[in-house]
Image: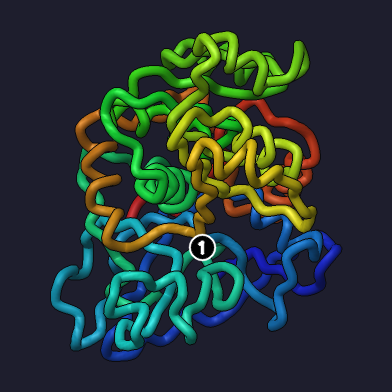
Amino acid sequence: MRAVRLTDAGKPLHEAEIDPPEIGPSDVLIRVAACGICHSDEHYRAGISRIDRLPVTLGHEIAGWVEKVGVDVKHVTPGDRVCLHYLAHCGNCEFCIRGLEQFCCTGEMIGKHRDGGYAEFIKVPGRNAFLLPDEISFEIGAIMMCSSATALHALNKARLKPGESTAIFGFGGLGFSALQLARAFDCEQIYVVEINPAKLASAQMLGAVPIDETKGNPVEQIADATNGKGVDVSLELIGSAKTMRQAVQCLGALGRAALVGLTAESMSIFPYMELINKEVEIIGVSDHLAAELPTLIEFARSGKLRFPPDALRFVDLDVEQINASLDAFQNSIDHVRTVIRVTSDK
């Protein structure tokens, strides 16, 4: 089968012909229809996020058809449309039993620790396959499995309640989903902090109040917009110590800041004025949970989570096109996601 693989960190991906994977009794073989290109994939290619075992096929946002099932797999059958949870986990350890599989001691990230979806076929544990309704395209089903799922997990961790307000720092794939999901939670007012004019315009079209960071301190802008109250929940989706601090500072009393973006920088906080005095919380958000995916899929099926055609770009399973898409992450891209269309029919 064809696959686009990372062989050496810091170098372009290359195309390879490899054997299709053999499945075990609890596995499923998926014919990949679509795979999203995530910013994390560029971090893997660049060596910013280290991968110990190379070569590996990248891609963790995956949807397709079930090709084969192991004898122990009962919930899906060949021909089913599915999307894939990207954390392969044991299902038996303390954390997996508690439904917290992102902390599984033997867990593996698809497309990093094991081969991913930049290929014609992928093998995953059966528990990672979720039925994808006909109303949701493979392209949408794929990208939901990372940015949308993590945005939902962040809102759940922040305990966003109906009638509350939220500030979203960053309006890429995560922010685009977070805004719509916050509306599905009946959030009262949503502020989006960005520097990209096209993204600010898109956020405003979706009903958010745009906060242009280039025009002044976003903390002060949010304070002005809320008459000094601040917001109940903030989501930091950029991965910058500066914006993480701002996400805390813009909170009102009893506010919760959910930090999702990744950075190696340290962040300074004044404990009394910025935490203790307002009883605010700083919450770390790691990945998402399989248990959250049925709710996410239903949000998309019912139209509460949408990705209009102009939000996406499409490429083939072609190494030059994929490398160019990864190169584009060096700038602030105007669209939400680029998706590889791997297979058009069964």
Image point (14%, 77%), residue name: 74
- Mark 1, Cα crowd under 10 Å, few <14 / some 14-19 / many 20+, is many
> Along the line of sight, which residue is nearer the eye, 342 or 56?
56
Q: Name the amino acid type tagged 1.
A: Gly
Is residue 141 something one can see in this rendering?
no
> Along the line of sight, which residue is nearer the eye, 256 or 57?
256
> Along the line of sight, which residue is nearer the eye, 179 or 31?
179
So how many labels did they put on this image? 1
List x then y, in percent, for residue 152.
38, 45
List x then y, in percent, for residue 179.
43, 28
- Quick check: 170 above or below 19? above
List x then y, in percent, for residue 121.
45, 69
Horizontally, is 15 left or right of 36 in the view?
A: right
Q: Quadrant of residue 264?
A: bottom right
Question: Which residue bears the numbered disc 1?
Answer: 117
**Colouring style:** rainbow
- Quick check: 24 above or below 64? below
Image point (43%, 16%), residue name: 206
Image point (78%, 62%), residue name: 48
